[in-house]
Image (cartoon, rainbow, N blue to C red):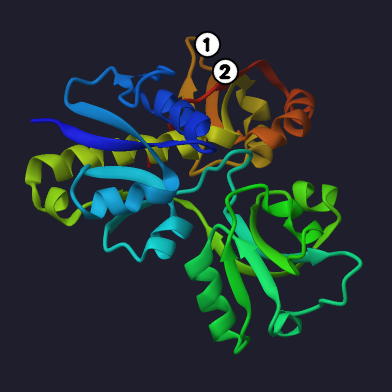
Amino acid sequence: MKLRIGVPKGSLQESTVRIFKKAGFSIAISERSYFPSIDDEEIEAVLFRAQEMSRYVEDGIIDCGITGNDWILENDSKVIRVADLIYAKQSLRPVRWVLAAPNASHIQSPKDLEGKKVATELVNVTRKYFKKNRVTADVEFSWGATEVKTRMGIDAIVELTETGSSLRANDLKIIDTVCESTTQFIAGKKAWQNSWKRKKIEAIVLLLKGAIVAEDKVGLKMNVHSKNLARVLSLLPAMKKPTIAQLSDKNWCDVDTIISEKDVKILIPRLKEAGAEGIVEYPLNKVID
């Protein structure tokens, strides 16, 4: 038996392959094939665009897959949401679909778009958004390059953004957030009811989540004399508590902990000043609670 899993083609492809690698699965994608190779004989991978992934999972064409919550909503797909995997192209934050308009326009709120034209790839979600705001707007599908549509007679757009830099580069201002989206690991109902496939999916998700938790963290270990231990420990943030092991010299111990990578440059000089020696920073692939 094999588990057929959908790998998102396009903007999420590179980050997905990287996260799978950290989780222990090596995926190799050929430019001429939609069937990537993966170093697990129990898995068969298929490339699909994130926009259509949830429909193929719902229809049972694939057992499970990775896509954005935005496209699950857009397709109104009835699937099992196995896990929320917060990773994107550039960051470990949810991405946003935002309503944006030209900086020079009078548009300040959704209500200013009554009777106006709005372009987006996320048509159904956008229509529901305007309906919720009691605004009748003409929402049309955009085939791409949405940011430039306001120069071609479109009054506003709804577009995906992580940092807002592309919108600013196109002289657009954000009016409102239409929805937030994180990456989702989803499964079809039939596959989820199969005990072998469900167990395999849960194992994959456990490893993926561990890889994501490790993304912005590093391991830190050091030798500390007993007289300095309390002072060093007071400086150390940790997911739980640092691991302390006595060395062959009973006056010294090894201290091992996990910390946020952004804190390392501030913390290491302080640890050295507090008496820590032999400080070693090392990368992490997975952190599993």
In the picture of the structure, the residue carrying the numbered disc 2 is 252
**Relative to 155, does residue 45 appear above or below in the rendering?**
above
In the picture of the structure, the residue carrying the numbered disc 1 is 249
The residue shown at (38%, 49%) is: 52
Query: Disc 1 marks which amino acid?
Result: Asp
Residue 115's disc number: none
Label 1 packing within 10 angstroms: few (<14), some (14-19), many (20+) = few
**Relative to 79, does residue 253 appear above or below in the rendering?**
above
**Quarter of the view holding residue 50:** top left
Assign a secondary structure to mark 2.
Answer: strand
Q: Residue 152 at x, y = what percent?
A: 77, 59
| In-image side of 32 versus 199 (left or right) | right
Q: Residue 81 at x, y = what percent?
A: 31, 57
Q: Residue 116 at x, y = what percent?
A: 71, 78
| In-image side of 28 versus 92 (left or right) | left
Q: Could one spot residue 243 in this view of the protein?
A: no
The residue shown at (76%, 52%) is: 148
Farthest residue, direction front: 153
What whole-number distance in Å separates the C-alpha atoms at marks 1 and 2? Answer: 6 Å
Asked if the residue under mark 2 is in contact with the one under mark 1, i.e. CB atoms within 8 Å, the reply is: yes
**Relative to 198, does residue 132 appear above or below in the rendering?**
below
**Quarter of the view holding residue 260:** top right
Q: Nearer the viewer, residue 152 or 79?
A: 152
The residue shown at (54%, 34%) is: 215
Assign a secondary structure to mark 1.
Answer: loop
Q: Could one spot residue 15 in this view of the protein?
A: yes
The residue shown at (66%, 27%) is: 227
If the image is split into quadrants, where does the N terminus sit?
A: top left
Query: Disc 2 marks which amino acid?
Result: Trp
Label 2 packing within 10 angstroms: few (<14), some (14-19), many (20+) = some
Farthest residue, direction bottom: 134
